[in-house]
Amino acid sequence: MRTAVVIPPPQARGSLVSVVGSVEWTGPQPGCVVLELPSGQRFQLTGTAADDGERQARAGQRPSRQEIEATGHIPPVGATSCGPVRAFWVERLAPTGR
């Protein structure tokens, strides 16, 4: 399992990867779901799986901070609601049990 992501050029889509890290579901504002990898890299999680996880955490159905395995890719650079971090488009999320 990867603990870091190779960052593609700004206009390119990254490869599909699976990474393990810590996610903060209830960030400072709605839509700001941050994944931090052991390497120190930080990404804003985007996509339906991230939206569902945030909604569950805000409803008390999931911990606000959780260790997860995320499978997805880094899309071309675009605006994020979490400040100067790259987005990570999530296709699949799973708790790691840690």
Image: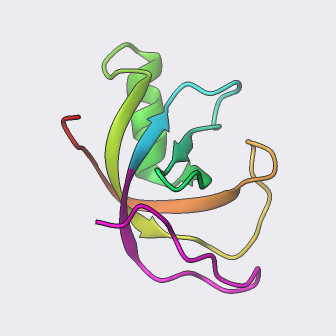
Residue 8, quarter of picture: bottom right
Quadrant where the C terminus is found in the figure: top left
Name the residue at 48% across, 65% down.
Answer: 4
Residue 30, quarter of picture: top right
Q: Would residue 65 be found to the left or right of residue 43 on screen?
A: left
Magenta residues span: 1-20
Asked if residue 28 is positioned above or below residue 59 in the image, the reply reads: below
Residue 32, quarter of picture: top right
Asked if residue 71 is positioned above or below residue 41 in the image, the reply reads: below
Asked if the stretch drawn in magenta spans residue 35, the answer is: no
Which color mode does the image show? Answer: rainbow
Asked if the stretch drawn in magenta spans residue 3, the answer is: yes
Q: Position of residue 87 (x, y in %)?
A: 63, 59
Q: Would residue 29 be found to the left or right of residue 58 on screen?
A: right
Name the residue at 63% across, 76% down.
Answer: 7
Q: Would residue 51 be found to the left or right of residue 32 on screen?
A: left
Q: Position of residue 26 (x, y in %)?
A: 55, 25
**Labels in figure, total:** 0
Give the farthest residue toward the top.
60
Between 60 and 15, the one lying in front of the other is 15
Q: Position of residue 24 (x, y in %)?
A: 51, 32
Give the farthest residue toward the left.
97
Asked if residue 24 is positioned above or below residue 81 in the image, the reply reads: above
Name the residue at 37% across, 13% down.
Answer: 60
Q: Position of residue 91 (x, y in %)?
A: 38, 63
Magenta residues: mostly which secondary structure?
A: loop
Quadrant where the N terminus is found in the figure: bottom left
